[in-house]
Image (cartoon, grey):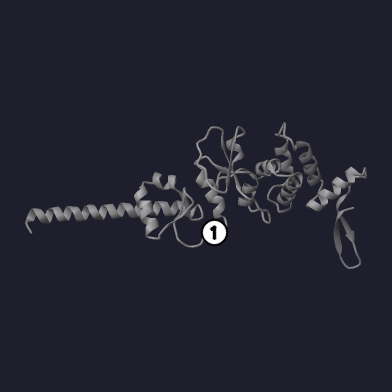
Amino acid sequence: MSEVDRIVVGMDGRRGQRTATMRRARRAMVDALAASQDGLVSRRQVLALGLSRAEIRANVSARRWQLVGRHVVCVHCGPLVERAPLWVAVLSVGPRAQLDGASSLLAAGLKGYTVDVHRVSVPRGARTFRGAGVDIRQTRRWSEDDLVPVGIPRTRNEVAAVRGALWARSDKQAALLLAMAVQQGVAPADRIGRELLRIRKAPRLAFLRLIVGDLLDGAHSLAELDFAAECRRRGLPEPTRQVLRRGPRNSYYLDVC
């Protein structure tokens, strides 16, 4: 091999080393972002960090990554975490998407409540991508003040509680969602009440005002809300809630009295 050939080979080797180093650096940035998103990133985020579509395909083919739907990548091939469907819903829609309604409350820690599809809100006119299992709602009531600034993109708990109740399929479901949010401490009744005051017109507004009033009075469950509604329907006095009683051995509270 001539001296010129040795120089060319050396240059190609250093170029290959630099390329591999840059590739590892880009992968590290993707991993760091995914660590803050329960192991998930959108294709858009990966491309923005400098990786190419070919690199995405190569990592998937090598079984380092796995695809979750059309627009989301998981940076490992193990089982997904419990919150993964929430991240997939918001990442698959677009950069301004936010979990809303009951889905936002689930992301905040609400237990025992299920949804068929996850509700995602975007500003009016925003570009979105459609995905299975996601209900996208464009809204004029978009405000940065309504959003949680950290973690999974979502609306504040009291905003999500009111919207989830307005969007519920029935009055019973709306009352259940509000009662569970208050009972589990996800959204205090007074904050829900203040948020409800912002709503000027809605088909279920009068009903929700009654429900929130009962929650402010101390009702903590759907059964207590139903009891209060039946009292009103029959013309009976409003019950007194959470009344302390002392027995021969201990003290206890009555839900209604």
Q: Quadrant of residue 142?
A: top right
Q: Quadrant of residue 2?
A: bottom left
Which of the two residues, 128 or 213, is positioned nearer the viewer here? 128
Res. 164 in view: yes
Left/right placement of residue 133 relative to residue 169 reads left
Q: Position of residue 13 (x, y in %)?
A: 20, 56
Left/right placement of residue 27 relative to residue 138 reads left
Res. 26 in view: no
Q: Position of residue 112 (x, y in %)?
A: 68, 56
Left/right placement of residue 207 relative to residue 198 reads right
Q: Residue at x 60, y 51 (%)?
A: 107
Label 1 belongs to which residue?
81
Left/right placement of residue 19 relative to residue 138 reads left
Q: Residue furthest bottom?
A: 249
**Mark 1 burial class by Cα count in 10 Å: few <14, some 14-19, many 20+:** few
Q: Position of residue 68 (x, y in %)?
A: 48, 53
42 vs 199: above or below: below
Tally the numbered discs.
Answer: 1
Q: Residue at x 70, y 40 (%)?
A: 166
Q: Position of residue 57 (x, y in %)?
A: 37, 53
Q: Residue furthest left?
A: 2
Which of the two residues, 109 or 150, is positioned nearer the viewer here? 109
Q: Residue at x 19, y 53 (%)?
A: 12
Q: Quadrant of the N terminus?
A: bottom left
Mark 1: secondary structure: loop
Q: Quadrant of residue 10?
A: bottom left
Q: Which residue type does callout 1 highlight?
A: Val
